[in-house]
Amino acid sequence: MRHFDLEMNDLKKRLVDMAEIVQEMIKISVDMIVKRDINLAKEVFNRERETNLTEIVVDDICLKLIALNQPVGTDLRFITSAMKINSDLERMGDEAVNICEIGDNLLKYPDLKPLIDIPKMSNAIISMVRDSICAFNTSDADLADTVLSKDDDVDELKRTIIKDLLEFMTNTSDKTMLIRAMDLMFIAKNLERLGDHATNIAEDVIFMVHGKDIRHLKSI
Amino acid sequence: MDDIKIRIKNLNLYYTNFHAIKNVNMNIRANKITALIGPSGCGKSTLLRTLNRINDTIDGVRITGEVVINGKNIYSEDAIVDRVRREVGMVFQRPNPFPLSIYNNIAFGLEINRMVKSKKETDKIVRETLEDVQLYDDLKNSLKMSALNLSLEQQQRLCVARVLAIKPQIILLDEPCSALDPKSTANIEELMQELKQKYTLVIVTHNMQQAARISDDTGYMLLGKLIEFDRTSTIFTNPSKKETDDYVSGRFG
């Protein structure tokens, strides 16, 4: 195997590992809210440090691969996609941290309502991340395509959550209930952003495999 | 701490009155590939050739300064030139096999240096060195064939094998791929990556992309001066001198 190919494989492995950590972060951050276990936040914060470090290392590897090998064609698309996926994964880690920070406030109060749709949303997003990174790992554009349609389900769940919470808010004047409803709305928003990042990764994979840019097709 | 194989100290070289190498100082790391790049006439080949005293054969050459290999200055009065050239082998731009059989191309150096006592020993070294350059499997049944019948890439591999047979510690390569097509070039580059496990390699190349791809350290030369010498990744991503940046980015040279 060419020296260059070994380095490309190493890059791929780092991103797959990073995505694994990000999936854990999403799961733990939502578990923290559902199980009302404040200690889980620490696990997310620790993993965030890891993803931050990986982001810097991966960017450096990509920069050197481009500068030292002058890649073209699929190799070039792979590296530029890897740089964007790297950035998306790091941002996803930040979103999980945001959920924990909101959770820190939320857990000061009793449950507003049983949480059903938020764990559903989180599971859907974790499977999007898993599929998008698997599509990257195996250059499977068809799998990446399935991630795009799943994002619509996530958006639908978010709308349902917001609608339910708005109902709560219109029927109460209790300040603590309003705070809790607002926090849950922010969490739904964070989860939706996580879905968007997974979608970005899937779009990058399609570009990487076919050289076709499918972003913003409806708006431009 | 890196193991330094070659220490070049205040090295100057004059071709009669022309000052071709101007006070060069550099430490070349062991078991790494060091590339010398720069525009034509900058002195990179001349500098390479000072490392095994091949410039000595040119009339009017005068050298000051030191090249220290294994703790010994190869330009000191008691240095033995033959030994220097055994320790520091060289591969040239155009493959230059002897007009002999493949076998004898390798055996020649062993016999002239009295490095073998028996045919069996020669056979063993011929086989090992051809294996090292990944030629043995293809040529094991035609070792008596003239080396001149080989493809250019195979000839260049044979020239590397010929150097390896003498058991050098350092291999100098002067534009070793410029006569080769892209595929053969890629194969020789992979071979260099293999060889650095056992040897220290110094390569002169006018192909900047090649220097970037294969080397660990890169020196940029201009008008006889070593402008910048650093890790290859630094030279090609964030060089400290503007002259280097202009050259590697194609604005100059």
Image (spheres, rainbow, N blue to C red):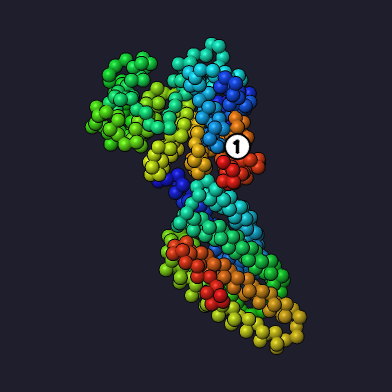
- Which residue lies at the image location 49% right of the left edge and 55% below the top edge? A76
- Which residue lies at the image location 54% right of the left edge and 77% below the top edge? A218
- Which residue lies at the image location 60% right of the left edge and 32% below the top edge? B223
- Which residue lies at the image location 47% right of the left edge and 23% below the top edge? B88
The three-letter amino acid code for the residue at tag 1 is Asp
Q: Chain of mark 1?
A: B
Please identify the quadrant where the N terminus of chain B is shown.
top right
- Dot 1: what SS? strand
Residue B5 point in image, percent of width and height: 54, 26
State the image quarter where residue B236 is shown.
Answer: top right
**Extreme bottom residue here?**
A171
User: Which residue is more in the foreground, B23 or B193?
Assistant: B23
User: Which residue is more in the foreground, B160 or A145?
Assistant: B160
Residue A82 point in image, percent of width and height: 52, 57
State the image quarter where residue B109 is shown.
Answer: top left
Residue A143 point in image, percent of width and height: 43, 68
The answer to whether one can see residue A21 in this image is no
**Is residue B46 placed above or below A77 in the rendered structure?**
above
User: Which residue is more in the foreground, B88 or A192?
Assistant: B88
**Does A171 sit left or right of B44 as displayed?**
right
Residue located beneath label 1 in the image: B230
The answer to whether one can see residue B22 in this image is yes
User: Which residue is more in the foreground, B172 or A98?
Assistant: B172
Please identify the quadrant where the C terminus of chain B is shown.
top right
**Is residue A96 placed above or below B34 in the rendered structure?**
below
Mark 1 burial class by Cα count in 10 Å: few <14, some 14-19, many 20+: some
